[in-house]
Amino acid sequence: MAQWNMLYDMYERRLKAELSDAAVPAHIGVILDGNRRWAKQRLMPVSLGHKAGFDRLREITRYAVGDRGVFVLSLYVFSTENFSRDAKEVGYLMDLFANNFRTIADEMNERGCKVLFSGRREGLQQRVLDAMDYMMDLTKDNDKGIVNFCLNYGSHAELTDAMRAIAGEVKAGTLQPEDINEKTIESHLYRDLPPVDLMIRTSGEERLSNFLLWQCAYSEFYFTPVLFPDFTKECFDKALEEYARRDRRMGGNTKK
């Protein structure tokens, strides 16, 4: 174990040096996938897979915004579709959120980072909402980074809610149809955040699953077979290393 730690420290120092001249993604999205498969592979209850995934989430969050300098980290922790899962599993996840969000808030506050939530509040238990509000209130004045928890989130729902709000303004006469543009839509999304530069999905699946569809128009995608509870800081560094090799043309000419 000591030898492995020494080798990883050497690898980390080398990678940081290689990435020092490359732009670190300002906004990274992570689809946290594979908790249930991780548990089933070990003949464990699904709840233990979610617990292991949440522990990994805390580690990666601290590492990304604290050590790597990522300014916005958006985490897909619970989708609108996840409510269709077994009620016992959903209840456990709500317990996990309600019981651990405050600890994360304290950790992020110590690092000067702001915590936000994206998603519909309707349908969430009050104790979860209370923990969410505590996190946002505690960290609202911080400016060293943003952790955006996407909870009860779906991109279709986000765009539907945005269109409904815009339609309401048009009906009220405060907005003219001809004045609607991309900026109008962006200002009505759940959060006014920069576009996603890098989207990471664990577990080997290669799809977005209704996550940040508007924000990912020009994102780079990184898919890894690693299940999220096994997605270590080294795995995160490999994603950054791959991103640094990409040629982001944004619809224009190549930079290489």
Image (tube, rainbow, N blue to C red):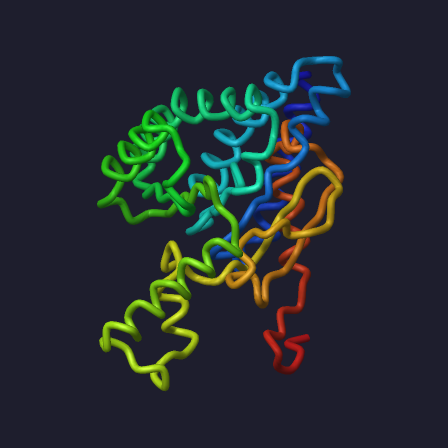
Q: Quadrant of residue 245?
A: bottom right
Q: Position of residue 213 (x, y in %)?
A: 56, 59
Q: Position of residue 128 (x, y in %)?
A: 37, 29
Q: Residue at x 59, y 43 (%)?
A: 31
Q: Residue at x 43, y 75 (%)?
A: 182
Residue that protrudes farthest toward the bottom in the picture:
178
The quadrant of the rendering that contains the C terminus is bottom right
The quadrant of the rendering that contains the N terminus is top right
Q: Position of residue 2 (x, y in %)?
A: 66, 17
Front one among 18 and 199: 199
Q: Is residue 192 above or below residue 76?
A: below
Q: Quadrant of residue 45?
A: top right
Front one among 144 and 123: 123
Residue that protrudes farthest toward the top in the picture:
44
- In this rendering, would 82 be left or right of 26? right
Q: Is residue 195 above or below residue 88?
A: below
Q: Is residue 221 above or below residue 92?
A: below
Q: Residue at x 39, y 24 (%)?
A: 98
Q: Quadrant of residue 187?
A: bottom left
Q: Position of residue 58 (x, y in %)?
A: 48, 29
Q: Is residue 125 above or below residue 29?
A: above
Q: Residue at x 73, y 44 (%)?
A: 205
Front one among 229 and 168: 168
